[in-house]
Amino acid sequence: MTPGNSNDSNRRFKPLTVPRRTVMGPGPSSANPAVLRAMSLPVIGYLHPAYFDVLDEVETMLKEVFKTEQRAFAVAGAGSAGMEAGLQSILERGDKVIICSYGYFCERQVLMCERLGAEVVELRSEWGKAFDPQQLSDALRQHPDTKLVVSIHAETSAGTLHPIKEMSDIAHAAGALFMTDTVTSLAGCEVDFDGWDLDFAYSGSQKCLAAPPGISPVAISERALDHIRARETLPSSWYLDLSLIADYWGPEHKHHHTNPVNMVYGLREALALTLNEGLETRWLRHERVAAALRAGLDALGLESPVEESARLNQLTVVSLPKGVDDVKLRGQLFDMYGIEVGRGLGQFAGKVIRIGLMGESCVPANVFNLLNALERLLPEHGYETGKGVGTGAAAAKLASEPAPLY
Amino acid sequence: MTPGNSNDSNRRFKPLTVPRRTVMGPGPSSANPAVLRAMSLPVIGYLHPAYFDVLDEVETMLKEVFKTEQRAFAVAGAGSAGMEAGLQSILERGDKVIICSYGYFCERQVLMCERLGAEVVELRSEWGKAFDPQQLSDALRQHPDTKLVVSIHAETSAGTLHPIKEMSDIAHAAGALFMTDTVTSLAGCEVDFDGWDLDFAYSGSQKCLAAPPGISPVAISERALDHIRARETLPSSWYLDLSLIADYWGPEHKHHHTNPVNMVYGLREALALTLNEGLETRWLRHERVAAALRAGLDALGLESPVEESARLNQLTVVSLPKGVDDVKLRGQLFDMYGIEVGRGLGQFAGKVIRIGLMGESCVPANVFNLLNALERLLPEHGYETGKGVGTGAAAAKLASEPAPLY
């Protein structure tokens, strides 16, 4: 029998190492080193006063980031857990729900609602274009008994931003609740929970907040919480019941499941860094760095299938020119340059690459690194670009700004 | 506008700090520093080959720890997410489920099953005693159409260990599937998934595996996976659908939700440390350290409401002598000694404290620290103990063992 001390020399497994990567996909993005440091602080009990102080601080910070004076806290799971928590908690079997669908993650919302036994009305519109709120008005006239309207603010599969405030107003005028996905938008562009009169918004830690994936910040209106507490039947999920999660995060800190202590440490630090940078400064950083990327791509003659007014700063969708092989190009970027970009999903599969510039990954160095790699690789696919043309254009764009932001 | 660099001196928030604590509650327990280090490695994409290597290694290690040649992977949430994933995935509305209930967390299983619209048969038995398998035989004769029998191996609220192999055999003889909770047992005492013919077992990262909370290792039989894939209706939860999670962890690594990359790093490291120590050596460490604690408590005249043969090593329940105030004592331990112990839940509320010795927290130093604190505090509550009596008895017990284990 060997002693239990794991420092002995005959250990079977060596410490984990991971390869160096420039993470520029649709998410996760890189985590800030200070966030990773915070996550490695010692575990303390999730029912003790010192930890409640952490929860209370996180709730206060989240309210500032979501721009709400109502409730904000975190669901212990991926962004999809936040998505499902909203749907599970608000909808009862047989309730009518309208889903505005313009991308892959909207279709995930449809799948979830079908599983819940809701009556789903799908409003599909073209990928790559902003949703037309008139379509929602028309649908609500046809379905006046709708309980909930579901949407996505920044659709990561299509690279599009949508008119959430208008959609929310229309839903409320028809007496429906309104929820939206802010996974890719929160902390990367304006989200105004109270100003837009939202009922539920969920996000992810791993995008513009620059923490690792695994925890989902959410905000919820008093109206939605009242609705959940007045349901006729309980949500089929206990784990994702927002009223129970709200009560754990609330002043009484009622026992629910074990809270993911170190993920919350990381979220706290990510929120602190976000607010130290300044919310509007952070949005501006995403705008300027994305503008530099777009200037570089333009100079290389590369186009986007997304209409200009609907383009996200956090995620740029680039159409692959004729002859450029999707799988091969992404493999080359990955193997030769250590750069992760995303593939196309759904309607865009095989036709585009998706470039994320979010949170810690949203820096000029990443833009230059990727443009340089594209300038060197695309000619191998039969698409000629001048060397230095894209990187030069990106630098010129950045130089036209008053001062560096990061 | 301030620059985005968060090192500037006018930052609003300082880096997070947490107080020093000796974590000896029912969970979480302390995380091994190497696990915390692994969690702070850089984020890489959850759909890239380098990360699939990590997943594959974790699955291999989990199979060794669960003792199974079937499937093992992790649900992205707390142990309660693993619990609910099993119930959501196996049960359809109207299915009959028998829940063997002898503690607080068994009652959580009841609540979850009721929410799912299952027909719940509750077999309640006395807290503090091992479950009598005959009770299950009788119930299955009365309910031959039972689809699933649910149990807990180590009940953390009651401090009891239960005869899972016998219960599993009885369930299968009646044609039912059998699932059990191994949150507190896994890596702290024997769990033999294949040998006990289990269909589903879920655990937590934050107990005997010595990682932070937030991810739930699970094992599942081929029989249970086939059952889930052949359901008439889909599980109401998409996030917790074990067939989708199994497909992401499986050789095709099919897209599901964003995987909690850094939590999986931590789990990998915790499994590596567990297997480096040796599974049986680790069980023996839990046995010996708990025996030392019990020797110390005995010497102080403190008793347990748990029958001797059913006592857990991972968690010791101690009855508070007459006149000892529960809330005051735990507050003193916390404030004066930095020691976290657990309160009584359910039937044990106000009557006991619960002392966890799990994973990284399961070391002689913690036993001495707590016994010393009790020797100093209990006389203030009117309960006299000799100074050094408990600590001395614990040391004598440890000295009777052939060699130190940790």
Image: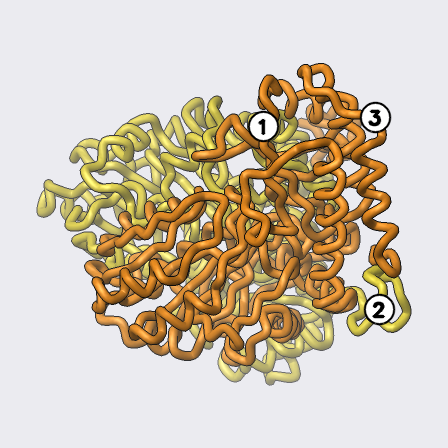
Chain colours: A yellow, B orange
* Chain of residue at mark 2: A
Of residues A20 and B387, which is closer to you in this image?
A: B387
x 59%, y 36%: residue: A46
- Measuring from the top left, give residue B47's x and y in whole percent: 56, 69
Q: What's the CA distance linking mark 2 and mark 1?
A: 41 Å
Q: Secondary structure at mark 1?
A: helix
Residue B208: percent from left, percent from top: 66, 54
Residue B77 appears anywhere in the view: yes
On residue B387, which mark appears?
3
Chain identifier of the residue bearing label 1 in the image: A
Q: Please state which amino acid type lies under the numbered disc 2.
A: Thr
* Residue A286 in which image quadrant: top right
Label 2 CA crowd tier, 10 Å (few <14, some 14–19, many 20+): few
Q: Which residue is mark 1?
A: A52
Q: Amino acid at mark 3?
A: Lys
Q: Quadrant of the N terminus of chain A?
A: bottom right
Q: Residue at x 60, y 42 (%)?
A: B26
**In this rendering, does residue A361 appear at all?**
no
Q: Which mark is residue A241?
A: none
Q: Which of the two residues, A325 or A277, is positioned nearer the viewer here?
A: A277
Crowding at mark 3 (Cα within 10 Å: few <14, some 14-19, many 20+): some
Mark 2 or mark 1: name the one nearer the start of the chain: 2
